Image: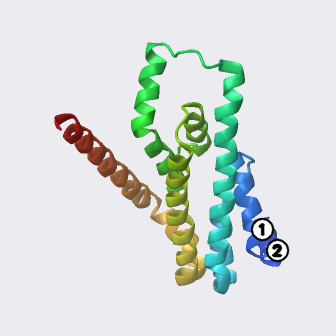
Amino acid sequence: MLKSIGDALIAFGPAGLFVIGLLDSLGVPLFGGVDALVIYLAVKTPHVAYIAATTATMGSMLGNLLLFRTARYGLRRFVGDEAPDGKRQKFRLWFQRYGLLTVFIPAVTPFVPLPLKVFVISAGAMHTPVSRFLAVVLLARVIRYFGEAYLGIRLGEDAHGFLLHNGWNIAGIAVAMVLVLVGLIRWYDRRRAEA
């Protein structure tokens, strides 16, 4: 089935990946996912691999933005704007400081068993600034999809196997990046408090 979807995408070109990226980021379950299709297109049509990665990134950005906006404005109807109690306030403060890191990890790597949609909805519900949210998703998706396109071009049919074999290493690198970022945030907060 993945081959027939891939063949259809090749017929539609990178525009097909835009639609798949949009639907996937909105939470529509898709067989194979964007990752496998980016690799497939990179292997079969290397000359459009980076264009395909770009359209997948843009589709994913739009889908995540729509989900984020729905959470931000849709939840307000049900929850209202009342002041949160103590636990919700603590969570809100924590999410304002570190929440976008929880968006970054599942957005940058498909190997961590964390559903990105939950964190996108949380970011919207916690009124995270849209520009910061989009910057984090853009950075994560560029790293992920352009990396997969590069692997598809360089490794050909072995690219998917490479990702499966090294998935935990890639996830470990993403977690290490997040830990460094958390350390930098805490260091910056201490310096600001001392000043």
Q: Where is residue 68 in the image (x, y as percent from the top left)?
A: 64, 41
Which numbered circle lies on residue 12? 2
Q: Nearer the viewer, residue 145 or 169?
A: 145
Q: Position of residue 66 (x, y in %)?
A: 70, 46
On-image quarter of the N terminus:
bottom right
Q: Residue at x 61, y 36 (%)?
A: 121
Q: CA–CA distance between discs 1 and 2?
A: 5 Å
**Residue sitting farthest toward the top:** 85
Residue 111 seen from this side: no
Q: Which residue is drawn at 55% across and 74% down?
A: 159
Q: Which of 172 and 23 is in front in this view?
A: 23
Q: In this view, does 125 lie above or below 115?
A: above
Q: How is the image coloured?
A: rainbow
Do residues under tags 1 and 2 come within 8 Å of each other at their CB atoms?
A: yes
Quadrant assignment, res 72 = top right
* Callout 2 crowding tier (Cα within 10 Å): few <14, some 14–19, many ≥20: few
Indicate the amino acid at tag 2. Phe
Mark 1, secondary structure of its residue = helix
Q: In this view, does 96 lie above or below 51?
A: above
Q: Relative to residue 116, is residue 191 drawn left or right?
A: left
